[in-house]
Amino acid sequence: MIGPNGAGKSPLLSILAGALEPTEGQVTAAPGNGRHARVGWVPQRPAQYARLSPRENLDLFARLEGIQDPSETSDRFIGLLELPDDGRPSAALSVGNQQRLNLAIALLGRPEVLLLDEPTASLDPRQRRRLWDVAAQVRERGGAVVFATQNLEEVEHFASRVVVLLDGSVVFDGSLSEFQQSPEADVFA
Amino acid sequence: MKAIRLLLAKDLRILGRSPALLAALVLYPLVFAVLVGLVVRYASDRPRVAFVDLDRLPETLTVGGQSFNVKQVISEVQGSVDLVPMEEEEAERQLATGGVVAEIVVPPGFSSKLRGMVESPQLVLKTAQGGLSGRVEQQTQALVYELNRRLQDAYIDANLEYVTLILEGGEGSFLGNEFDIVGLEQAEVMLAEIEQTSDNPEIVDRARELVTFVREAQLALGASGDSLRATANPIELEVDTGAGRTWLLSAQLQAYALGLTLAFICVLLAAAALAAERDENVIGRLARGLVRLGDLVVVKVLLAGVVAVGLGFAIALLFGLLAEILDVTGGEPWERLPLLVLGLALAGVAFGAFGTLVGALARESRTAVLVAFLAALPLVLIGLVPEGAAQAAWWVAQAFPFSHAVDFFQAALYDTDPWTTLLRETAWLLGLALAFGAAARLAVRRLLV
């Protein structure tokens, strides 16, 4: 999902995540067996408790997600995303670490749909690779990853379908190859 | 229910990590409670009353043979009001503008009527319209009572001087006539001499009868001082200032201290805690199905309730320990603490519900704290207005939990038969908690935008 600032990418992702109610229309994300898909959401600004440590945040959200063994799950994500585990509150972490914690919380419920809102904006190249590796695992499990970005390289590397938003409206919706041949690609190049 | 428990534990953990903030939140209202108590006690107890002297009272007024220094007497009897001497025109102006709450006028001829002791002179009281007039009238009556008591004492003393003269003899004057009398004591001596020296048995018998009469008269007149004072004051009020509970540990101050502390802490805490979910960008994550928005409001209301019970109980313990250590009259009603805990929980929940409404409307925690403080302060102060003083303010105060919480605490701790009050205030606090909570539930969607 690409578009200039203020195009409506973040609100659309919030609506897809269920955090915002649409003023019209509806969101469906059915995996095919009649139940709602599990959705993980990584908002652009980290959504976690600043005075809790990464482990406490993961523990809390794991329990809220109803995960069987929250402590073991927290351990796993702290290791997987190389999060600091020294008891510091997450407010004291670097922006990159906060963003990884943000991603870890979204992944707790083994999402079938992962929504990423400009996820790499504050990450260094190594952390970016780690993020896309994790996102790839969701796809490998048969899930989907929807991400908003202004970085066309990321689109070319990781997207199979592109939606272009402008002033709150979809101005393009097609495959990556269709996008590359469309005039919109030149606008964002 | 699980989500509520988890988020409540999270909020308490975060709160526990801010001990300085918690201490400030506790100390501030406690200091505030003492200051309010002082203002209520010392400001409203002595309303400013104009004293208009149209009679031009002399510096010294002699009544019943007793001389009074008018200024001194007035300054001594004005304990219940602050009497300010002023001209009639100025007094009228200040009464109209609220500079004074009443005007006491000494009409022309007052002192001459007082000296004449034939007709009671009158003081004129003019009060402003409104809630305080009844109270000022009572306080002025107290002042007139005190004046009357002093005059009464003077009259009695003057009468007793004549009685002493009759008993002991000597020089005196009455209605301008000067005289020199023997007195009963000397009369008894003289009669005894007659009885011993006379040869006439008839005179001796009469002298003996007169001696008996003189002795009885001496006894009777000797007791006349007490009986005169008893007739003048059939009931006397003995003031024992050491018998009551010291004001600083009084039931009223304890209830106000608890009410004020909870009002500020719970409203601010619930408002800030709810708005902080948006500040930390977590509300969207929670609202995706992890926690219902209504449950989020319940969490913050319960947080306020838990904190209210913890802090309120600690304050009550502190008051109780001080009462025990200082051996304060009445002590602490320890057996009533469970009732108090119930009140603390109800009050905390009601204040918390109001706080969540503020937090939902303010949306951002710093704004929420400011709005909560600005809202709580006048609502608490309105709650201090006594019923009957300003009816509109009293009704506004009913729509805020503060006055109900204070009434509950007072009844729970010190009323002999508290149940009617407790039931009434429980209904009020629960009703307000439900009303504010429902409004907060409606408003909390604003946090998602």
Image (cartoon, coloured by chain):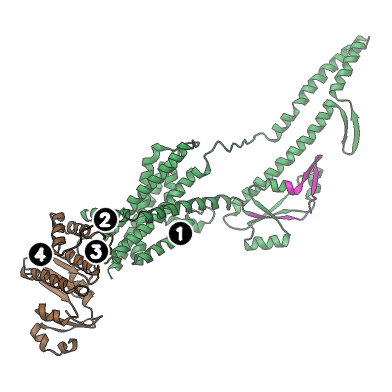
Return the mark for residue B10: 2
Residue denoted by label 4 = A35
Mark 3 residue type: Gln
Label 3, on which residue?
A48
Foreground residue, B327 or A21? Answer: B327
Position in image of residue A162 (x %, y %): 13, 81
In this figure, what is the number of numbered marks?
4
Same chain for the residues at labels 2 and 1, yes or no? yes
Query: Residue at position x 57%, y 55% from top?
Result: B131
**Which hue is chain B drawn in?**
green
Image point 11% across, 63% down: which residue?
Answer: A110
**What letter labels the chain drawn in brown?**
A
- Residue A116, percent across and down? 17, 72
x then y, percent, for residue B441: 30, 62
Q: Which residue is mark 1?
A: B377
Mark 4, secondary structure of its residue: loop
Q: Are marks 1 and 4 in contact (CB under 8 Å)?
A: no
- Callout 1: SS: helix
Which tag is nearer the camera, tag 1 or tag 4? 1
Looking at this view, name the residue that lies furthest to the right.
B199
**Where does the magenta region start and end?**
B48-72
Amino acid under label 1? Answer: Leu
Visible residue check, residue A28: no
* Local crowd size for mark 1, using a 10 Å CA cut-off: few (<14), some (14–19), many (≥20): some
